[in-house]
Amino acid sequence: MEVLPLVALVAGCAIVAGLARRTPVPAPLLLVAAGLVAAYVPGVPPYGLDPHIVLPLLLPPLLYTAAVDSSYLDLRANMRPVALLSVGYVLFATLAVGYAAYLVVPGLTLPVALVLGAVIAPPDAVAATAIARKLGLPNRITTILQGESLVNDATAITAYKVALAAAVGTSTGWTGGIAEFLLASVGGVGMGLLLMVPIHVLRKRLREPLLQNTLSLLIPFVAYAAAERVHASGVLAVVVVALYLGHRNWQVDFATRLQEEAVWKMVAFVLESVVFALIGLQLPVVLKGLGAYEGVAAAGYALAVFAVVVAARFAWVFPATFLPRRLSRRIREREPGTNWKAPVIVGWAGMRGVVSLAIAFSVPMNVPHRNLILFLTFTTVIGTLVVQGLTLPPLIRLLRLPARDAHAETLAEAQAQSEASRAADERLTELLASPANALPPPLADRLRTVLERRRNAVWERLGEVNAVTGESADEVYRRLAGEMIAAEREVFVSLRDARRIDDEMLRALLRRLDLEEAAAYREEST
């Protein structure tokens, strides 16, 4: 692909995704629509993807950024439901969707139908978890959805490779397929365990944030390539490494953490936006290549596949929720109070997304009915985003699940900060007692004031709000601090414009203000 079309694609996706944030319509749907419109604009070049580089290029960074932000401890505590969804459900959906497509679509062989089933089997819980956090769903449901989306990709891709081998005639039979599945799974986890500690040690030894962030960008691709080299699951290797690094991220210096967060948010934003835009850009080509399956028949197949995808989710979620509790007293004691509402939410939160699209784009050109597989994947992803994505928030409100206790969470945060501040105060007193750490009283008092401010900030969120603005004392403090910093920033810029300081000094002064502003403002979850 030439440079200009590639730049135009990324820029256009960024613009559309940015505009989507100002509308109630989900960004993926607007990106698909924009891509479809652009495909019919004269002069827009065809955007093709090499199937051999799609998975290695798209999946590693997307999985890495999701896994790094996940909680290893929460995932371990919910390993049973996560495993049932990410492994059991994906295999069940692959078989159910594949066999249904084999029965419904004339001329579609069972191996090709199973390729389709594997492609659209894994739900993408990014949108679902964002909605869950925004509406305050119980943390356990959010963790299960997020954990499922991390591991189910590995299950789907491994099942896809087994079905693909059968579709192109290189399969060694179902016994060989099962052996390949087990080898890929165990090997992927093993490769992740082998790489995670050396990579973490290297990250800690590098002192330059730029070098550390360069390494961070390489990590998912290295883990994926190393695992695929030995015919193991690159996806599982990436997830294992990312979970370990995320769990140990506190051991890396603050500058690296700040830069990494910004860099990976940008990477995920660009990749996800581009993938959805490519649906619209390639849909006209796919429709032309449907052949005998075009028109009303193709729409009927799309509706049938979508219905099976939705039904299969509920057919698995309800037994997987209640059957283990019926069979095990230990599970009943550990997970009390579960009713039918939580499985309904988990079942309806089965939207498909970027992973299914990436796998679909990677289907080789010589696979029979490739355009049909792409078409049914596109329609299923769009259908789940429209039907389930738009109706999930009102469904959550209708069922009235117990919300997260924001007061209890803030109280726990305040208690944790209080304990940490007490330890820091004791350490400061110990350090100041040494002649080597002698400080003028105003500077020593400043250290204690900053510590006290940090200690009180969380408690203030539990207190009364401002009668005029509705803000807590902590929010008023941060707003006023921001106004003061903005005033200083304007003065620095005016001094630079008057040639009283140079640009190098301006950058140093602005960076100092930026760090103070970052400390004053606590990032809100989105």
Image (tube, rainbow, N blue to C red):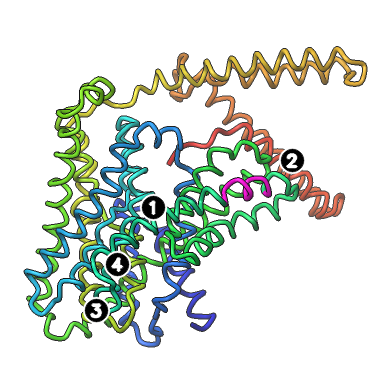
Measured from the top left, where is residue 358 in percent x and y? 36, 66
The residue under the point 76% across, 49% down is 494
Other residues around mark 4 within 10 Å, as few (<14) / some (14–19) / many (≥20): many
* Vertical comparison of 206 with 364: above or below: above
The residue segment tinted magenta is 195-202
Q: CA distance from mark 3 to mark 4?
A: 20 Å
Q: Which mark is residue 512?
A: 2
Which element is circle 4 on?
Answer: helix
Between 56 and 445, the one nearer to me in the picture? 56
Side (left or right) of 314 relative to 176: left
The residue under the point 29% across, 26% down is 403
Q: Which residue is mark 1?
A: 21
Which one is earlier in the sequence, the residue at label 2 or at label 4? 4
Q: Which residue is mark 3?
A: 371
The amino acid type found where label 1 is placed reads Arg
Between 143 and 41, the one nearer to me in the picture? 143
Q: CA distance from mark 4 to mark 1?
A: 39 Å
Measured from the top left, where is residue 381 in percent x and y? 25, 61
Which one is earlier in the sequence, the residue at label 4 or at label 1? 1
Q: Which residue is mark 4?
A: 162
- Tell me where residue 365 sits by quadrant: bottom left
Q: CA distance from mark 2 to mark 3?
A: 55 Å
The amino acid type found where label 2 is placed reads Arg
The amino acid type found where label 4 is placed reads Val
